[in-house]
């Protein structure tokens, strides 16, 4: 992810219309008893607050292995992080029954910079070899609360800004091992993660 007004960026979501797997993909997802994450929940703001809730050493965006992917996850969704640039391989264990939300590339800044960022923002993702259809979030006003020393906002406290990006949300995955590949770019910035997702059943949790 690119910098946020000179500070490293992570990803967020302010969900628009439903996004998901390409028709006929046959990917192993399961029906969820939970309602889909609603656009009214301002998921971009929630994602940024999640990503800013850990200092640099344990931050999921700085994480090079996936060891910290479970930090401060909310009960109704599971967020995944990109990188501050470049491509990493991560392994992440997560409970079954959680919808997934993650950016392919994103930014928090002012309205003008978000508009410029989105002119070249693009991304792609595959789950278990099947193409996922992303969605574009052109700009939401978000409130982000971070802890001291976090690598996204750089400081403790609450800020308000615009968030934008190319996002993916998925229904809960079936228990077992899944391979998720995400790539995103805007201008000269490139980010990507090859995720091995291990979804644990209730018995394994």
Image: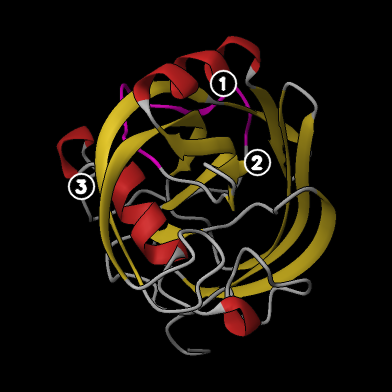
Q: Is residue 129 magenta?
A: no
Residue 23 appears in the rendering: no
Q: Earlier in the sequence, mark 2 or mark 1?
A: 2
Residue 27 placement: quadrant: top right
Residue occupying image coordinates x 73% and y 21%:
187
Location of mark 2 (residue): 2
Residue 198 placement: quadrant: bottom right
Q: Earlier in the sequence, mark 2 or mark 3?
A: 2
Magenta-tinted stretch: 13-26
Q: Which mark is residue 64?
A: none
Helix, strand or loop at label 2? It is loop
Give the image location of residue 182, x and y in percent: 71, 41
Q: Earlier in the sequence, mark 1 or mark 3?
A: 3
CA separation, marks 2 and 1?
Answer: 10 Å
Location of mark 3 (residue): 35
Tell me the crowding category of disc 2: few under 14, some 14 to 19, or many 20 or more residues within 10 angstroms, Cα based: many
């Amino acid at each position: 992810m690119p910098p946020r007004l000179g500070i490293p960026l992570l990803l967020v979501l302010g969900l628009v219309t439903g996004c998901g797997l390409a028709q006929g993909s046959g990917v192993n997802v399961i029906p969820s008893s939970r309602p889909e994450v609603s656009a009214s929940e301002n998921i971009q703001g929630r994602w940024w607050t999640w990503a800013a809730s850990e200092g640099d050493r344990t931050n999921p965006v700085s994480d090079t292995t996936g060891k910290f992917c479970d930090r401060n996850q909310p009960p109704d969704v599971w967020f995944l992080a990109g990188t501050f640039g470049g491509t990493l391989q991560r392994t992440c264990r997560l409970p079954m029954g959680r919808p997934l939300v993650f950016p392919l590339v994103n930014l928090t800044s002012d309205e003008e910079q978000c508009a410029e960022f989105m002119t070249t923002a693009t991304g792609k993702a595959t789950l278990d070899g099947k193409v996922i259809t992303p969605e574009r979030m052109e700009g939401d006003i978000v409130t982000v609360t971070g802890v001291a020393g976090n690598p996204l906002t750089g400081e403790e406290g609450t800020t308000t800004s615009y968030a934008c990006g190319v996002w993916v949300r998925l229904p809960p995955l079936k228990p077992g091992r899944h391979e998720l590949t995400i790539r995103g770019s805007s201008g000269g910035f490139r980010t990507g993660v090859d995720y091995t997702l291990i979804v644990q059943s209730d018995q394994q949790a």
